[in-house]
Image: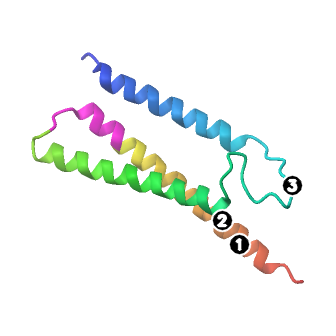
Amino acid sequence: MAINKLALDAYQSALTEGLKLRQEATKPNFAGPDDRSTANGRTFSETVSKALGDVNQMQTEKNTMIEAFAAGENENVHELMISLQKAGLAMSMTTAVRGKVLEAYRELSKITF
């Protein structure tokens, strides 16, 4: 079974995007304490809001593709599966980050001043 070029391009694009995001996330940021923006010029809350917006957009695209596939409007299973995997991975990462943030909050709340 031949892989659809569009599906292969989408997979490679998603993989490249993921690697770029991982590299950006692991770069050390040596900004001083007075610098409240991240390396890309956004504040922490803006970065979190954008990331959550991206995850929400992936979930919306996934739902749209599922509905189109179920209605028979789209027969491309490859794109559907890629969309499902991207949305699932994004949600898993969001859940993992949420868990780490809550864990850090609990640790900070144990500190007495």
Labels 2, 3: front one: 3
How far across and how far down the image is residue 22, in percent?
A: 62, 39
Identify which residue, 36 or 17, lies in the foreground.
36
User: What range of the chain is rendered magenta?
Assistant: 74-83
Amino acid marked by disc 3: Gly
Query: Does the magenta segment cover residue 76?
Result: yes
The image shows residue 98, relative to residue 80, as above or below, that is below
Residue located 47% across and 49% down the image: 90
The reply to whether callout 2 and callout 1 are in contact (CB within 8 Å) is yes
Query: At 84% across and 61% down in the image, what residue appears?
Result: 34
* Secondary structure beneath label 1: helix
Q: Residue furthest top?
A: 2
* Residue assigned mark 3: 32
The numbered mark, 2 or 3, whose residue comes first in the sequence reads: 3
Residue type, label 2: Val
Residue 101: mark: 2
For mark 3, give the secondary structure.
loop
88 left or right of 23 in image: left
Packing grade of label 1 (10 A; few <14, some 14-19, many >=20) is few
Tell me what residue is drawn at x 72 percent, y 75 percent: 106
Numbered label attached to residue 44: none
Q: Amino acid at mark 1?
A: Tyr
Considering the image in quadrants, where does the C terminus appear? bottom right
> Which residue does the numbered mark 1 point to in the structure image?
105
Distance from Cα at disc 2 to Cα at disc 1: 6 Å
**Most foreground residue, 32 or 13:** 32
- Image coords of residue 52 (percent x, y): 50, 58
Q: Nearer the viewer, residue 69 or 31?
A: 31
Q: From the top left corner, tell me how far across and down residue 85 is, in percent.
A: 39, 42
